[in-house]
Amino acid sequence: MSLHQEFDSIASLRKALEARKISARELADSALSAIQARTDLNAFLHVDPALTQAQADVVDRLLAQDQAAPALAGVPIGHKDVFVTQGWRTTASSKMLGQYVSPFDATVVSRLQNAGAVCLGKLNCDEFAMGSGNENSAFGPVRNPWDTNAVPGGSSGGSAAAVAAGLIMAATGTDTGGSVRQPAALCGVSGIKPTYGTVSRYGMIAYGSSLDQAGPIARHARDLLELLDPMSGFDPRDATSLETCDEQANEPGRIRAQFDAAVQVQQAAGSQPLKGLRIGVPAEFFGAGLAPDVAAAVETALRQFEALGAQRVEISLPRTELSIPTYYVIAPAEASSNLSRYDGVRYGHRAAEYGDIQQMTSRSRTEGFGPEVLRRIMVGTYVLSHGYYDAYYLQAQRVRRLIVNDFQQAFSQHCDVIMGPVTPSVAKQIGENRDDPVADWLSDIYTLGVSLAGLPAMSIPCGFGGARGNLPIGLQLIGNYFSEGSLLALADQFQQHTDWHQRKPEHA
């Protein structure tokens, strides 16, 4: 067992470090050993013990000087391989960037390091974050710790698998259409996608610029808070970073303050901590495509919230089915634009043999990009081409606005939070959809609308299913804009009364 697994939360680990019961270097070395022992999961792409130990030694020196420990002092984490990092390679799990090392850190990386977190390395993901199962990595699929023949979910599958297996306490991920929530659900851990623009995208390799948002993955809701709070805040280097009129809302601390206020309200309510809370349950989330075991687990979770005082309200999100074609027009269009920079000229893979510059670019992209990335680039290029832009891309943007309106009508008239499943089924077997790659796109039906609307949402464990009853199921909590702290408080309340989040795979 890795040393950090002896602690049930980041808070308890921090207390042990402050009391000198353990050192950051000891934690780092123990985690590195655990990672080496579980290479079968293929969760980590690049580990550099010297870099990790150097960060841990900085934390230990601060503690030795009796200086106030940073919020995440010594906490072992990993970064999804779409965040650029100094020292560690940043490949986006693609041959196109197979040996790339960035000269600077992403804002998310630097903020977490400044908060004391110790990076263990870079985590496997779907290539350029394009996928729902983490089978599209150029370096092989990540395996689910609950069943190593099953997918962990994508695209942040390496992040979720590493946390579920106990290799690290937390990890960063990115969510474009569900890529934090889905792997968290399929691996039995917790993950949150904040409001679009809450966390800086500077230094995050772009897939869909109007959709990509960074978020943390951890075992508990309170651990998510420990990461998300320092990660968030306005960044002038990111044109999509939100700057509000309230200066305090632009700084780290907003989410923690909101969480603390919600917890105080819950505590004051006594045995019915969620009394007055209206939970919207969309009829469209419980149609024919939802597996019975997932539906049963979600229903049990909803009853637990009702037992805590919440009121269930039936609502409708009528354009749920339209979120799939809408997303798979907009996201590939943005990907087509973003990935045009990989031309073999300045950086990235360059073909060994070519005649002129046009042939060099064509061959470099053909060799460097995997089939799923090429598929989405082709779709995106098509919908942006002359004669099709109005018919597809502009129409998709109009439908996107209608999807936003559906959510806002639900929040303004019917409910305070929306709950439902994250995925239609438990984790599928690796290679199950190999002959029908578009089938994976359908598994995003409950998460895409949230991303199109830019809303915050999270996944928390709520049960198990599958043929052997050993595969995790996630519950999705969707909030209105800037309600991350309130969502985390609701999740924390649920986790105080259930133990799904405490269950671990056999070898974790």
Image (cartoon, rainbow, N blue to C red):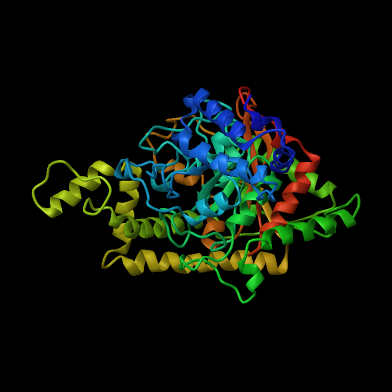
Q: Is residue 450 left or right of residue 371?
A: right
Q: Report the side of 354 relative to 468 (left or right).
A: left
Q: Residue furthest front?
A: 65
Q: Nearer the viewer, residue 272 or 6?
A: 6
From the top left corner, tell me how far across and down residue 321 is, in percent. Answer: 52, 54
Quadrant, the C terminus:
top right
Q: Is residue 281 visible?
A: no
Q: Quadrant of residue 190?
A: top right
Q: Which sits in the foreground, 291 or 303? A: 303
Looking at the image, can residue 211 be seen? yes
Image location of residue 17, percent across then percent down: 69, 39
* Relative image position of residue 52 (x, y in whole percent): 51, 38
- Tally of numbered tags: 0
Residue nearest the observer in this picture, 188 or 66: 66
In which quarter of the view is residue 473 placed?
top right
Q: Quick one: quadrant of the N terminus?
A: top right
Q: Residue at x 32, y 67 (%)?
A: 389
Q: Residue furthest right?
A: 270
Q: Residue at x 56, y 71 (%)?
A: 243
Task: Identify the residue at the far left of this view.
Answer: 355
Tell me where residue 180 appears, x and y as whole percent: 55, 47
Q: Is residue 398 left or right of residue 378?
A: right
